[in-house]
Image (cartoon, rainbow, N blue to C red):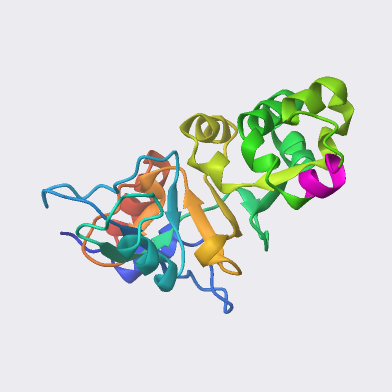
Amino acid sequence: MKQLSKKQMSVLLRDTLVKDADGAPMMVFRGEHGKTDGASTSIRTLLGSISFGSQDAASNYAESPNQRGLSAESPTVYPAYLIIKNPFIHGLDDPFIDFSFLENRLGTEIAVECFLKNAGMVENTNNWQEEINGNDEWTGLRDFYNTHPERMGELYTELFPMLDDPEFIRVLKAKGYDGAIYGGSGHNALEREYRVFDESSVIYALSREITPKRSLKKAHDEVALTA
């Protein structure tokens, strides 16, 4: 497959926020597993966004799927560079998102809908179990919301289920966001995780071609004429 020249990559990655400590575009890794016919070069995912992280995190996922009863088949890890210019979240050091942050970015209605949709995750936080509902006053998050909608700003929850949700990602894309940069959890705790909302934001570091958006393709084609 066609490889991008250093000049072409420089143009496409010029404004990305996925950078190393020296400010250079940083290579990240994705782990996958499952049967493949070998013909497709597309990313395999059932989720709303595409995740990347450290080489160790990618290897762990490829070899040990985090889905009960599922064994790894044809584990694959590959390196890539990501074009993330307008992330929904950038720089979080933990895996949680505050209701107030979501409300400020997307509005109260969407924030409430997202938190109620992920009520189980909210109710599993120490904040809910010890501070909000330590006396078992409410049967659950919906009961709390119906009673005290003005207190939703006291809540937080883990971010990853929202970034897994195709419907939520459609909302983010409609708002102009192209990815997320945040703190990992579980095996990836204390590490950064990266999500892109479209495969066109991925530049494969090995043999796969980039599939750029029109605006990125225009920049790519213009550079190709002089590269």
- Which of the 4 image quadrants contains residue 2? bottom left
205 or 112: nearer the eye? Answer: 112
Name the residue located 71 percent from the left edge and 38 percent from the top edge. Answer: 102
Quarter holding the N terminus is bottom left
Magenta span of residues: 127-134
18 or 144: nearer the eye? Answer: 144
- Which of the 4 image quadrants contains residue 29? bottom left
Name the residue located 31 percent from the left edge and 64 percent from the top edge. Answer: 63
Can residue 112 be seen here? The reply is: yes
Name the residue located 16 percent from the left edge and 50 percent from the top edge. Answer: 36
Q: Main secondary structure of the magenta part?
A: helix
Q: Is residue 166 shown above or below 128?
A: above
Q: Give the left or right position of residue 51, taking residue 141 as reference.
A: left
Can residue 227 be seen here? The reply is: no
- Which of the 4 image quadrants contains residue 113? top right
Residue 72 horizontal/vertical position (percent): 26, 58
Q: Is residue 107 shown above or below 205?
A: above
Q: Is residue 93 shown above or below 46?
A: below
Q: Give the left or right position of residue 111, taking residue 36 as reference.
A: right
Based on the picture, tell me whether residue 111 belongs to the magenta stretch. Answer: no
Name the residue located 23 percent from the left edge and 51 percent from the top edge. Answer: 34
Residue 76 horizontal/vertical position (percent): 26, 62
Residue 163 horizontal/vertical position (percent): 53, 43
